[in-house]
Image: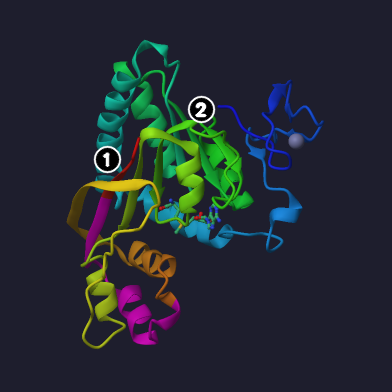
Amino acid sequence: MSYLCPLCQQPLFLKERTYKCTNNHQFDVAKEGYVNLLPVQHKRSKDPGDNKEMMQARRQFLNGGHYQPMRDAVCDLLTGLLAEHTMVEGKSQTYSQLLDIGCGEGYYTSHFANALSHTEAQSGTKVVGLDISKVMIRHAAKRYPECDFLVASSQRLPFADAQLSAVVRIYAPCNGEELQRTIKDNGVVVTVTPGPRHLYQLKEGIYDGVKLHDVPVEDLPGFELEAEHSVAYPMTLNSEDATTLLQMTPFAWRAPEALWQTLKETEQFACEADFTLRVYRKKA
Ligand SMILES: C[S@@+](CC[C@H](N)C(=O)[O-])C[C@H]1O[C@@H](n2cnc3c(N)ncnc32)[C@H](O)[C@@H]1O
Ligand SMILES: [Zn+2]
């Protein structure tokens, strides 16, 4: 994958284990294989993004396979979209580039990379995972050495104009102008957001009269909503996974002691997963 220097926006060239631009800004490849392209002056805090505890909680829950149906649906969608894209671009294209924005600990990124490398039409797709959290990226790179990972902010993407064929965004923040700049004409953004009934049963333990999630269509400048899919299914969680799931959610801090206790004592907690997948296409 090729990157731009985050300081002067010139292309970076990899020599041995260091990326360098023509202005001699340098970024070393870490021993785990990722590169940190988030300069101190672009950070708002010392360790931005999710921390080690969040990483471990997410990793443990995802390893249980509870979000695998969503992951597979996104992967099928991307495979189809990228095949279409390669056809549109014809033979002149060397490879398509897919960015997983806010990739966390790489669970989805690695699956997309493996799946796309096994699809004949897609063997030329390069996949890169980006997250602002160094701890997330370090673990991702260690666990999935076959993928490219980088520390950077979605607010300033270290990619050239029109470099990317597709961006996938699973529960992560982004910057619409940066997507518009870095994605090719006819390229796509695939987003995953919570659907109306997502984690309904957890919310029942917190709120009187649970409101269904609102799922507003995003206003991404230069893009049009092309498709929307719902991926909804029941999950049966053991006590540990149900507790970890609650810890991962933004409403954990509101959860009453009684709910934590219920989850601690439960053998099987039934809970709905409901995701909204959307495809936004960049207008030519
Ligand atoms: C809710 S997590 C989702 C992670 C992963 N996509 C998943 O679903 O498991 C959001 C991720 O976005 C990252 N993040 C937050 N702000 C970011 C930013 N400005 N740029 C890039 N990543 C960011 C966090 O570090 C975290 O890993
Ligand atoms: Zn530079």
**The magenta segment:** 253-277
Q: Quadrant of residue 280?
A: top left
Q: Residue at x 41, y 30 (%)?
A: 113
Please state, as top left, top right, bottom left or bottom right, where the C terminus lies in the image.
top left
Q: Callout 2, which amino acid?
A: Glu
Mark closer to the chain start, 1 or 2: 1
Q: Does the magenta segment cover residue 166?
A: no
Element carrying mark 2: loop
Q: Residue furthest bottom?
A: 208
| Contact? badges 1 and 2 (CB < 8 Å) | no
- 48 or 237, nearer to the observer: 48
Q: Residue at x 45, y 15 (%)?
A: 94
User: Image quadrant of ligand 2?
Assistant: top right
- Residue 203 placement (x, y as % from top left): 28, 77
Q: Quadrant of residue 41?
A: bottom right
Circle 1 residue: 72
Circle 2 residue: 146
- Residue 115 appears anywhere in the view: yes
- 46 or 278, nearer to the observer: 278
Q: Residue furthest front?
A: 284
Please state, as top left, top right, bottom left or bottom right, where the N terminus lies in the image.
top right
Element carrying mark 1: helix
Q: Quadrant of residue 20?
A: top right
- Residue 104 appears anywhere in the view: no
Left or right: where 152 falls relative to 25: left
- Residue 251 placement (x, y as % from top left): 39, 75
Q: Residues within 10 Å of mark 2 (few under 14, many from 20)?
A: few
Q: Does the magenta segment cover residue 269?
A: yes
